[in-house]
């Protein structure tokens, strides 16, 4: 029943509208979520003053990671809501919640004005963002996959990751332009707030876009053929699809570690550890994100033609082989060019395991509990190895003084990714889905 409706039978205009709603809404959400990391160096001064820069940055990245504490909870609740109420309602809800959290950060007065209340309000806002983000990935992927033609699911699913590249590109570009166009005093006083305040507008726009999309035909058909209420999507996933969930978890570990180290942490590392300017690292990050934006759909298309496992294997192995030499070269002579070389080279490899990942994970679970399965894998892997990575790395660098720590962390994540790819068994997954749907 997971293939009840071939997306090729859906009218092109309807499919196009659904894809745009999923992509733009997802990009809006990830933009809102990511700009905190883009402005972490400035936010540290505004909300987390400390006796030294390292402690201030640690407090800032700890709050960045706080959003990931609530992401698994949001993922479970919103994932189940998506599987019960439908993709459209859940995605409309997540974009509004994200906009509220982002707007709060943009409006909170600095520590100098209201004291401890300022960082507490920022924590609250990040928790709200984390709850929202918990349901976004699974809902958007389910929408894209279920509207896609069967032979183009890799391509359609890859647009989810490409939209993250778009979000990170816009975030790093806005950070670069503000850094270059404003004095340090103006940037710290009010300039950094501009992207967060724009995030308030993203809520109604995203809500409008998603309200104009109909429900996923595959999900609607699954409800007709299996109308009985499922006892609990969470219990069903954990009891009937544990291997599939663990494979998804392993893929997310390598994907999330790459995202939050290469895109979020490396700019902080470049400024605080390597002496680069904020403008330099933001420009480099922007270029790396453009590569993700462009190459993820190509990688998704390749997985449709060549198979999911071969593309994933080759990409993760290539990524693991270049991590150490790239970081070594960067540390030997940090400059704008070596930072661009490091981030952009890693982004090329990232694109080819990012692109096939959504379709790979979605195909492991039946339609009626797909969003819950995706949410569990995505949010557990993302929380433990992605969002908390900046905090882990800042602490380890402080304790060890070893500047190769980020490279070791990325290499560790490839072990999870390769193990998960090796364990992927789509025949078993299809058999398990058929058994579950029949019983």
Image: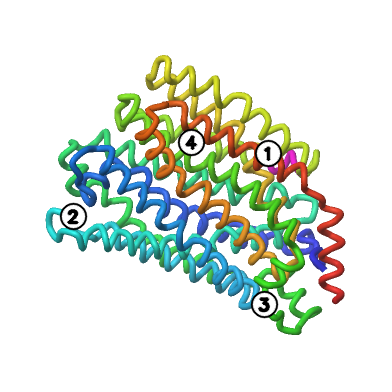
Residue 293 part of the magenta segment: no
Query: Looking at the image, which is closer to me, 302 or 211?
Result: 302
Q: Distance between the residues labelled 1 and 2?
A: 43 Å
Badge 1 marks a residue whose secondary structure is helix
Tag 1 near tag 3, CB within 8 Å? no
Q: Is mark 3 on a helix, strand or loop?
A: loop
Mark 4 and mark 2 lie on one chain; the one further toward the N terminus is: 2
| Disc 3 to disc 2, C-alpha distance | 44 Å
Q: Which residue lies furthest to the top in this view?
A: 332
Task: Name the residue beneath numbered marker 4.
Answer: 262
Gap between marks 4 and 1 measured at Cα = 19 Å
Per the image, the residue denoted by label 3 is 232
Q: Which of marks 1 and 2 is in front?
A: 2
Choose mark 3 or mark 2, whichever is in front.
Answer: 3
Q: Say which of marks 4 and 1 sits in front.
A: 4
Q: Quadrant of residue 258?
A: top right
């Amino acid at each position: 029943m997971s293939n009840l409706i071939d997306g090729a039978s859906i009218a092109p205009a309807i499919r196009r509208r659904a894809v745009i709603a999923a992509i733009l809404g997802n990009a809006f959400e990830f933009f809102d979520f990511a700009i905190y990391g883009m402005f972490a160096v400035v936010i540290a001064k505004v909300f987390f003053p400390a006796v030294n820069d390292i402690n201030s940055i640690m407090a800032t990245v700890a709050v960045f990671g706080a959003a990931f504490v609530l992401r698994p909870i949001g993922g479970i609740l919103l994932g189940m809501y998506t599987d019960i109420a439908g993709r459209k309602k859940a995605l409309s809800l997540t974009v509004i919640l994200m906009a509220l959290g982002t707007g709060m950060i943009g409006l909170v007065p600095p520590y100098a004005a209201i004291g401890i209340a300022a960082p507490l309000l920022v924590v609250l806002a990040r928790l709200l963002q984390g709850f929202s983000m918990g349901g976004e990935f699974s809902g958007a992927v389910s929408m894209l996959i279920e509207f896609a033609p069967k032979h183009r699911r890799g391509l359609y699913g890859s647009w989810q990751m490409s939209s993250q590249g778009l979000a990170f590109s816009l975030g790093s570009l806005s950070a670069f332009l503000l850094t270059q166009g404003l004095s340090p005093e103006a940037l710290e006083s009010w300039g950094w707030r501009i992207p967060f305040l724009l995030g308030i507008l993203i809520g109604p726009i995203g809500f409008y876009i998603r309200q104009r999309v109909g429900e996923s035909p595959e999900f609607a058909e699954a409800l007709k053929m299996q109308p009985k209420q499922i006892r609990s999507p969470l219990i069903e996933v954990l009891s009937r699809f544990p291997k599939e969930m663990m494979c998804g978890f392993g893929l997310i570990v390598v994907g999330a570690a790459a995202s939050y180290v290469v895109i979020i942490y490396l700019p902080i590392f470049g400024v605080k550890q390597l002496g680069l300017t904020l403008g330099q690292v933001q420009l480099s990050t922007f270029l790396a994100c453009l590569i993700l934006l462009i190459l993820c759909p190509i990688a998704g298309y390749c997985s449709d033609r060549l198979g999911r496992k071969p593309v994933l294997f080759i990409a993760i192995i290539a990524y693991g082989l270049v991590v150490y030499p790239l970081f070594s070269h960067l540390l030997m002579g940090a400059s704008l060019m070596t930072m661009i070389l490091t981030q952009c080279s890693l982004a090329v490899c990232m694109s080819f395991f990012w692109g096939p990942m959504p379709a790979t994970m979605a195909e492991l679970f039946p339609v009626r509990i797909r969003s819950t399965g995706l949410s569990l894998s995505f949010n557990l892997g993302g929380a433990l190895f992605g969002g908390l990575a900046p905090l882990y790395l800042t602490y380890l660098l402080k304790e060890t003084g070893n500047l190769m720590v980020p490279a070791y962390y990325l290499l560790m994540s490839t072990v999870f990714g390769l193990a998960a790819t090796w364990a992927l068994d789509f025949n078993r997954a299809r058999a398990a889905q058929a058994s579950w749907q029949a019983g």
